[in-house]
Image (tube, rainbow, N blue to C red):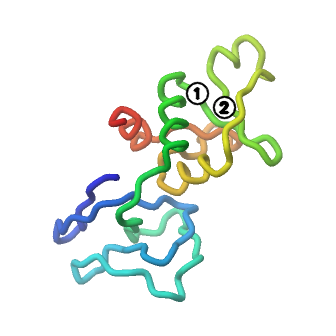
Amino acid sequence: MRIYSHPQTRVPISGMRLAPGAILQAGDKYASSDGKWRLAEPCSTGMVLHRGWETFWVRPNVEPSPGSSQLIVCLAQADASLVRRRSSWKLITPQHRAQDPRVDLRADSLFVGELLTYGLIAQSERDPEVYTLTSDGRSFARSI
């Protein structure tokens, strides 16, 4: 869990920032133009956040699950990436890529989804099938 500040008033909120692709849930809050953190309207529950939207969304008082935390530490320590193969995710380290790109470790889709929701991993600019740690993800891994 992290502490964020409202962009205009610096009012703090604890939780995890939502990244593009996250699906809004009841209880999520956004940085309102009136300087307060406001609850999402009931009609916005289920809405998907899109890249380029300027609204700052936070899921209050949550942190990644233990499984997601272990996965992010593993990604950071091994300098690994995640690759989506059909309906599963595979963890690939630089050593595996150099030796044999077919040697992969599976990653649980639930944990990968959590890391995507909180912006701790993102799609690689070089390869759309590869997902790597973001700067927030690296920072989060160091804090565990």
Amino acid bearing label 1: Ala
User: Horizontally, is 141 left or right of 70 in the view?
Assistant: left
Q: Which residue is mark 1?
A: 80
- x, y percentage for residue 89? 72, 41
Relative height, residue 67 to residue 75 (above, below): below
| Residue 29 vs residue 66, the one in the foreground | 66
| Mark number displayed over residue 108 | none
- x, y percentage for residue 15? 35, 60
Query: Which residue is painted at 28% across and 80% down in the image?
Result: 33
Query: Which residue is painted at 45% across and 61% down in the image?
Result: 18
Going from N to C along the chain, the mark reached first, 2 or 1, is 1
User: Horizontally, is 36 left or right of 121 in the view?
Assistant: left
- x, y percentage for residue 55? 40, 71
Distance in Å between CA atoms under marks 2 and 1: 7 Å
Q: Residues within 10 Å of mark 1 (few under 14, many from 20)?
A: many
Amino acid bearing label 2: Leu
| Residue 24 vs residue 31, the one in the foreground | 24
Q: Which residue is mark 2?
A: 91
| Element assignment for label 1 | loop
| Residue 13 vs residue 97, the one in the foreground | 13
The image shows a total of numbered marks equal to 2
Relative height, residue 1 to residue 98 (above, below): below
User: Horizontally, is 69 left or right of 5 in the view?
Assistant: right
Q: Quadrant of the C terminus?
A: top left
Query: Which residue is painted at 48% across and 23% down in the image?
Result: 77
Q: Is there a contact, CB below 8 Å, between mark 2 and mark 1?
A: yes
